[in-house]
Image (spheres, helix red, strand yellow):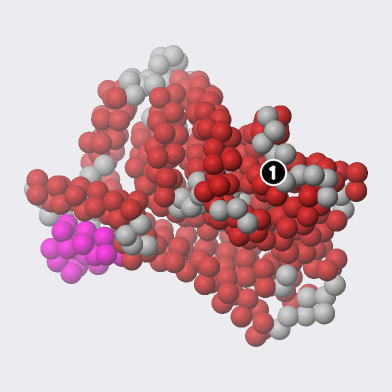
Amino acid sequence: MTSPLALTLLGLAIIAVTVGLLLKGKTHPIVAMTLVPIVGALLTGAGISQISDYYGDGLDRVMSVVVMFIFAIIYFGILSDVGLFEPVIKGLIKATRGNIVLVTLGTAAIAIVAHLDGSGSTTFLLTIPALLPLYEAMGMSRYVLLTIVALSASVMNMLPWGGPVGRASSVIGPTPNEIWTHLLPVQGVAIVLVFAVAAVFGVVERKRVAKQHASGTSVDVNAVAEDFARTQRDERAKLDFTQRTGTWVTWANALLTVALIGVLVSGLSAPAPAFLVGTALLLVVNFSTLDDQGDVLRRHAPTALSMAGVILAAAMFLGILDGTGMLEQIALSLIKILPDSVGPYLHIIVGLLGVPLDLATSTDAYYFSVLPIVQQTADAFGVSAMGAASAMIVGNVIGTFVSPFSPALWLALGLAHGEMGKYIRIAFPICWAFSVVLVLGAWTFGVFA
């Protein structure tokens, strides 16, 4: 049996090598997240049968995301092919009057509202496909879009039906609603800070985009809108399938999409079956022949299956680290190395390290392994269970959608056609700084007592 120290070191090595490969972009994520953890599992003495079981456990955690991802990509791809978003994006471009700051602020507002259901996958599905064409048309970075949406969703994860609060509640006792009520002032401040970050992003992007235009000072809104429309028409002209036309088709597509969003937000159905049914209906509404339906599926299958493969590889990464006990040992070891003198501030220290800890442990390991130890230690120094849990939630929740441990993040990257390494390089320092400011501010006002 492998010792706890060996599991800790091996787990950290696997994470470091995998994240390093992703950051450098030297190999495909499927390669990094499959082969690296398998080597680690073999070093623990696990056999092929055990590795297969670990993968099966990891697969159970991501399969619904995989199914949803495949059909969501195809669904929004079809809507793009038929031009449903074209008038909407043109309208948004003109409504912003070329003001990129308004775009980033609007992105934060939309993402905050979209995440009221507490599901990261749903939030990314509702925001990124709708806003990405606008960002591309205005020359803005897709990584700015991803970071703003991820930060907004993370802040809203303090809701009682969010995963972090629910996990913490199961450990310390108070109901999720009681924890949320305690954190509500912090969440309010966090939302304001999200808009501040979005505004800064907007100012930076406005300067960068302005340099790319001949005027050097402004964006020609009408020109951007017309360029977008012309690009969309040119792309549709290249398609090798014939679609139905007519006002009724446009209205049917719009109503179907509104209905699908309603189902997702209301929770009447899980996203996976909702997008499966939605895709089937879109095929019937927009394409009259079997050949045309097959052609449109083949057009979007490479993108859908490529990113689905990444999530399936992530199942190996997560399954092995969790199944071998590496994640738990990493969490426990990080606590043990701290000196006794930091006992009264242990929950604050762990909170300040919450975002990087999300890169080294899973959410489950953080709340079910680290939180009980921190709570017990802090309790000996007069810190309440609510205070200890609040510090850990506030510190960690901002990093929810920065870690490659999050299947929803892979979904977001697929929808935005982004790379994990580049995204982490941009989002990680911003989210960590955001988290540190929030923790220190809340601590100053006695939220963590």
> Residue 133 appears in which quarter of the rendering?
top left
* Amino acid marked by disc 1: Gly
Classify the position of the N terminus by image quarter: bottom right
Q: Position of residue 362 (x, y in %)?
A: 65, 58
For this view, does 340 lie left or right of residue 112?
Answer: right
Q: Is residue 153 above or below residue 404?
A: above
Which residue is drawn at the image coordinates 9% and 49% (left, top)? 248
Which residue is drawn at the image coordinates 65% and 79% (left, top)? 51
Say which residue label 1 marks: 387
Q: Is residue 16 visible?
A: no
Give the secondary structure at mark 1: helix
Q: Is residue 170 above or below residue 116?
A: below
Q: Is residue 395 above or below residue 286?
A: above
Q: Is residue 280 magenta?
A: yes
Q: Position of residue 232 (x, y in %)?
A: 27, 41
Label 1 crowd (10 A; few <14 / some 14-19 / many >=20): many
Work out whether residue 122 or residue 49 is closer to the camera in this orientation and state it: 122
Work out whether residue 198 or residue 183 is closer to the camera in this orientation and state it: 183
The majority secondary structure of the magenta stretch comes to helix
Q: Which residues are magenta?
A: 276-300
Q: Position of residue 432 (x, y in %)?
A: 66, 39
Q: Is residue 56 visible?
A: yes
Q: Position of residue 215 (x, y in %)?
A: 41, 14
Q: Is residue 9 magenta?
A: no
For this view, does 357 lie left or right of residue 223?
Answer: right
Which residue is drawn at the image coordinates 44% and 14% (left, top)? 217
